[in-house]
Amino acid sequence: MNSCPNISTSVNDGPVVTYRAGQNFPEMPGDRHTLDENASKTEPAKLLAVFVVDSEEKELLTPLKK
């Protein structure tokens, strides 16, 4: 049993990349996720997002319209 399953993500229609516990990746303003999922079918996963923004910024996420 893996206590920290992997997270698969795709940004800006790019390739799907799977990250393991302890890995990180940067994102630029305006980047959009086309996939975010737990790579495990049986174990829960966690993802920590840290935002570094101007103190005046009020909107950090923009949901995509379907």
Image: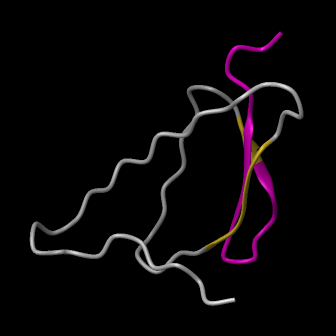
Q: Residue at x 84, y 33 (%)?
A: 40
Q: How is the image coloured?
A: secondary structure
User: Seen from this angle, which residue lies furthest right?
Assistant: 41
Numbered range of the magenta stretch: 1-17
Q: Residue at x 52, y 79 (%)?
A: 63
Q: Hey, which quadrant is residue 10 in on the image?
A: bottom right
Q: Residue at x 41, y 72 (%)?
A: 61
Magenta: main secondary structure equals: loop
Q: Quadrant of the N terminus?
A: top right
Q: Quadrant of the C terminus?
A: bottom right
Residue 12 is a magenta residue: yes
> What x and y, as percent, mark residue 3?
70, 14
In front here: 42 or 50? Answer: 42
Is residue 63 shown left or right of residue 2? left
Is residue 52 shown above or below 46? below
User: Seen from this angle, which residue lies furthest bottom?
Assistant: 65
Is residue 55 shown left or right of residue 4? left
Residue 35 is a magenta residue: no
Is residue 10 shown above or below 42? below
> What x and y, as percent, mark residue 56?
10, 74
